[in-house]
């Protein structure tokens, strides 16, 4: 079964750091670009970051550029999101997602999400 | 701000046909494909339509997508109570050089 499981969310103070992980299984992780999408509770989806299959190319939304860093370990089938200088507006559910069976940027597999709370 | 515009809400009665629009520009919908997601309360989004009109395996043919120029639409026919959810469109944007989502439409089945 194709599956993504996020972890690492929690409560952090403004200005703090957190590292999210996304463990993948059921597909050849190293063949696919991986993505992070976030959602403030009660609000819409925001595309946050992406990394190509070999880790060589990355994308960041303007709202997180310079503060977040995406990476992957293909030997561990795991995707990461290092989040530094966290702000109140970063508080959201963070999903990892991948386009396995559809087309390049149509995410047909999502994790359940991990909640990041930024508060003092 | 979102570059893809959706109505915040839509509604219909069981059995009705409902459409949800997604309006963009030449940098996104006008030159890239559109995908649609369904998000039931408390769950992760689910891919409903990809590449404008394609349905992933398992998605009922009550759901259909279309695209014309810089706009796209999701149609749901034979509306059911379980269709009550939030619906999002998405498309690549050449100006942002990234994926973008619409603001979402909350569908209520009356």
Image (tube, coloured by chain):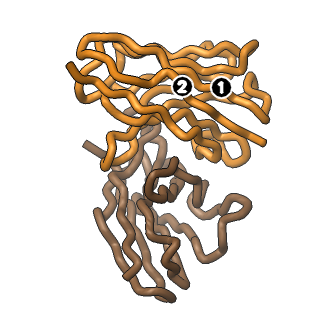
Chain colours: A orange, B brown
In the image, what residue occupies the spot 47% across and 86% down? B14
Q: x, y (%) of residue B11?
A: 35, 77
Chain under callout 2: A
- In the rendered picture of this protein, how many numbered marks are placed on residues? 2
- Furthest residue toward left: A120
Using residue A82 as the reference point, say whether residue A112 is left or right of it.
right
Question: Mark 1 or mark 2, which is nearer to you?
Answer: 2
Please identify the quadrant where the N terminus of chain B is shown.
Answer: top left
Camera-side residue: A34 or A38? Answer: A38
Residue highlighted by disc 2: A7
The Cα–Cα distance between marks 1 and 2, rounded to whole angstroms, is: 8 Å
Residue A60 falls in which quadrant of the image? top left
Disc 1: which residue: A23
Kind of element beneath mark 2: strand
Chain letter behind tag 1: A
> What residue do we see at 42% from left, 30% from top?
A48
The x and y percentages for residue A85 are 29, 12
């Amino acid at each position: 079964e194709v599956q993504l499981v996020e972890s690492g969310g929690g409560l952090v103070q403004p200005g703090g750091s957190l590292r999210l992980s996304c463990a993948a299984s059921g597909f050849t992780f190293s063949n696919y670009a991986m993505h992070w999408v976030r959602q403030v509770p009660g609000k819409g989806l925001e595309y946050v970051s992406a990394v190509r299959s070999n880790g060589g190319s990355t994308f960041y939304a303007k709202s997180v550029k310079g503060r977040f860093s995406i990476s992957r370990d293909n030997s561990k089938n795991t995707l990461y999101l290092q989040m530094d200088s966290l702000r109140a507006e970063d508080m959201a559910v963070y999903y990892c997602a991948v386009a396995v069976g559809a087309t390049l940027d149509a995410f047909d597999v999502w994790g359940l999400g991990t909640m990041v709370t930024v508060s003092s | 701000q979102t570059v893809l515009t959706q109505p915040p809400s839509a509604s219909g009665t069981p059995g009705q046909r409902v459409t949800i629009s997604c309006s963009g520009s030449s940098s996104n919908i006008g030159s890239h494909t559109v995908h649609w997601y369904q998000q039931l309360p408390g769950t992760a989004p689910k891919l409903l339509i990809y590449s404008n009109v394609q349905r992933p395996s398992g998605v009922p043919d009550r759901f259909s997508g279309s695209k014309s120029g810089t706009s796209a639409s999701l149609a749901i026919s034979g509306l059911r109570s379980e269709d009550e959810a939030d619906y999002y469109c998405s498309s690549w944007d050449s100006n942002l050089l990234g994926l973008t989502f619409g603001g979402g439409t909350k569908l209520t089945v009356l």
